Image: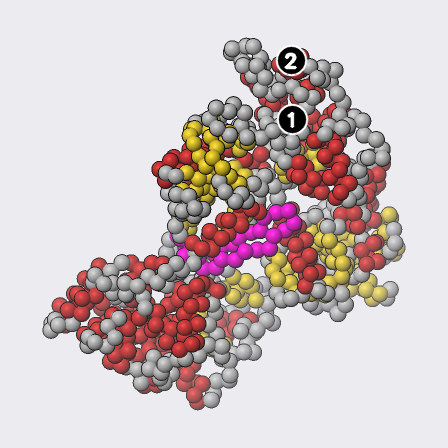
Amino acid sequence: IPSNGSLRSPARSYIYQKRWVKLDADYLRYFDSEKDTYSKRLIPVSSISRVSSIGDQKFEVVTNNRNFVFRAENDADRNEWIRTLQQIAEERKSKAPERTSMSLATDSATELADKSGFLELRGFKHKLFVVVAGDKVFLYKNAEDYRLRIGITYIEMNVGNVKEVDRRGFDLTTPYRIFSFSADSEQEKEEWVEAMQQSITEALSNTEVAERIWAVESNRFCADCGSPKPDWASINLCVVICKRCAGEHRGLGPGITKVRSLKMDRKVWTEELIELFQQFGNMMANQFWAANVPPSEAISPTSGSQERRRFVIAKYREGKYRHYHPLFGNQEELDRALCAAVTTSDLAETQALLFCGASVTCDTGDPQCPTPLALAERSGQRLQMEFLLHNKTSGGCGGVGHGVGQSSGRLLSALLCCAEFSRRWCTLQDGVLSYYENDRNTVPNGEIRVEEIVCLVNNPLHAHGIESTFEVYTEAERLYLFGLESPDSAQEWLKSIAKSFVHPRAEELLALDFERLGRLHYKGGLTLERAQEGWFALVGSTLHVCSEDGRRQEPLQLRKLQELCEYPCPAGRSPWLGGRCPPAEPRCAGRTLYIQGERKLDFLGWVHAIQKAAGSSGNTLLEQQMTESDVPLLVDRCIDYITQCGMGQGIYRKSGQNSKTTSLLEMLQRDARRVRLKEGEHQVDDVANTLKRFFRDLGDGLFTRRWAPDWLRATALEDEEAKIGKYRQLLAALPPVNRATLKALINHLFRVQCFSGENQMNTHNLAIVFGPTLFQTDGKDYKAGRVVEDLISHYVEIFNVNDQEMKKQQDEITAIMKMREASSSGTQQAGDFICTVYLEEKKTETEQHVKVSTTMTAEELIFEILDRRKIVMKEKDYWSCFEVNEREEAERPLHYLEKVL
């Protein structure tokens, strides 16, 4: 920032208001205070025509349409502001003659807008004119200010997240503020959300490659329509194109033009490819492809989709406007000339020969260098090699991949849309999967370049009416379905293809018996600004991840995900799938992972597969969604709700409504993550009944069929210490999930009996209810109740509960009892809640239990805690209150006047 400081700006001609003012290369902005992120007003530097002194401490900023008067703290500050503003304004003017009429058009906010219109924004009386432009969202008071480009503020979308709230409302959330918008209709809202999601995608992309390629003058404008700052390219045609023309290029297929993003497909942009684009440039490419374009057929930045499509087809597929090589039509001479050209630095000659019919794989007649690529390599022509590599399959299909694995055999293959399979002879050689009419044919029906494969799927047996099938997804949004009659042969093919397209850094994933394997983009941890590429393998309910630098990350146990949600799809990109994962180690914080596919088709398959793997799949404990402590989420949800709302009379003795219990159990078993039990919506007795029914119908039971008889026989031991020892021995023998679930349940029942004075459910009564339920005996064996009674009575000894754990439980029980006593005596107002608050860090010694009323603000809570701890606030001390969610993986600061509850 060249300059910033405190100035007074006049709200009217006779009133000055103190503002914090910032000046950067693009805008002069002023804020309410130095701490604010979003301005009250922004003035584009490009619109400033003059800056002059108008008296003591005052100066005037004159724009094309409006004047702004500022007053500094002193004359020295004023002079510094004037000097800096004049310097920047002069720099902009001096550069103006160098800019073409096309680049001048980009100064207009109208030309840059991806989406614009009126929206309601919470906190403003009138609708604002909102503009989504590139990687920013601009707010204007009205359309006239938008035309003049005098705005309120702009929002950098690299820190933004968009979430739909209701039928017409959506929130744009940043770390500094939540902007709550409301559109005129549901359709309008969806369009705004899509535009902002696209803006976020652009903001998180990398501009380094684009900046280097734009350094060449002709690359700053689309090779087809002339739009400024094109951020897409055809890597085999060596042309830089805009987003709209890129969409038409994709329609031609990868055999003609291979479209990649300058900002998002970082893995493609090797140093050689960047140099090729810098040396080639749109000018050289168009001297060949657009040598004879009639003015009546040329397109412009404002051309519609049909005009673009017609032009792109004529230019590249038909070659209608190209500059024909003198050897056109003479195949032998074209091939001979190509072999000579690739040994030189004449890329223009190579381009003309190649796209006029020369074969990139022609026979050179040199046994040492049998192809033009080999000749270029021997001659040290790196850029010729790069150009040949990207055009190895131009005009057709197939290509070169990472792998060198070779296989051939007889497969059944077909596109998924075909009604029946067609028998084809297939080969995998030199990174190309080819399929032929039969094993005698030499010309393939089609080819798949392994480097264009983004995902492999190993289907369950007989999924498509054939013993074994697998799917191949490519970058061109194509899905191929292959099948074999032998599972062993299918596995051999699957592993061979996987080895060919998976990067060597991720080869360890090949040892897994994967159901789905592919490359995806993801963000996580502290690197949410940009997405990186990773290799993912789904095995059962475990997702294995290998990052782009080859590091194998801790596998994700999908059934332990704390949250799983799909984010809306920006235009032209795949949607994001977000998941919050439990900590890999007990003391580590959980992590949030965002995943995005290469293309929409394969990503939708990933979404479905991950959602299925993250859900419950049966009625045994191991098949349930889990908490990080290996307790079924269903059990955890029910216990939490009953602890908070149902410690009163009749708990576990009253039966809930059968229909509601059945419905609730089905919802929780389908996806417990999405179920939020709320007081008023769900009755305590229904929830209690749901918990009992879950254990009663649990496959293999909580104590397991193998060990349940031993638990029952242990009750016959008369020596109490011997019996406790036997229980501990049997507890250790249970599977980890059963052991953790049993501890959680007995812990809950231990708490319930602490309130037996209120609920009449002492240890014996609880045992009568839960004994037959947990052992699934239907009351036929009294020893079941004896086991449960012993477990509750000796909970601390059997489950080895340490002092710290016991103290925490006692504190929670005490807090609940105090809250109930206050509630019953009428001294506690409705809505008061006992909250646990930690001072600066989460430690036992910093823990405080505070009664929080519905009216308590964050400021009041802070003073309450500081007063309890006898901490004296100093003049420059700043204390903040943070709200942390129950899993401790996300937090947000509360405004000091915001209510805590």
Instruction: List the residue tagged with mark 1.
Output: 276
Q: What is the three-letter code of the residue carrying label 2?
A: Glu
In the image: residue 283, left or right of residue 373: right
Q: Position of residue 333 (x, y in %)?
A: 67, 12
In the image: residue 560, left or right of residue 303: left
On screen, residue 825 above or below 346: below
333 part of magenta stretch = no
| Residue furthest bottom in the image | 825
On screen, residue 806 above or below 535: below
- Return the mark for residue 325: none
Q: Position of residue 105 (x, y in %)?
A: 81, 43
Magenta part of the protein: which range?
557-584
Q: Position of residue 373 (x, y in %)?
A: 57, 19
Closest to the observer: 860 or 776?
776
Q: CA distance from mark 2 to mark 1?
A: 27 Å
Helix, strand, or loop for circle 2?
helix
Q: Is residue 594 visible?
A: no
Determine the residue positioned at 27% across, 63% down.
Answer: 700
- Cβ atoms under marks 2 and 1 closer than 8 Å: no
Determine the residue positioned at 73% across, 35% down.
Answer: 312
Helix, strand, or loop for circle 1?
helix
Closest to the observer: 524 or 764?
764
Q: Position of residue 214 (x, y in %)?
A: 70, 34
In the image: residue 441, left or right of residue 651: right
Instruction: List the residue tagged with mark 2.
Output: 332
Closest to the observer: 653 or 132?
653
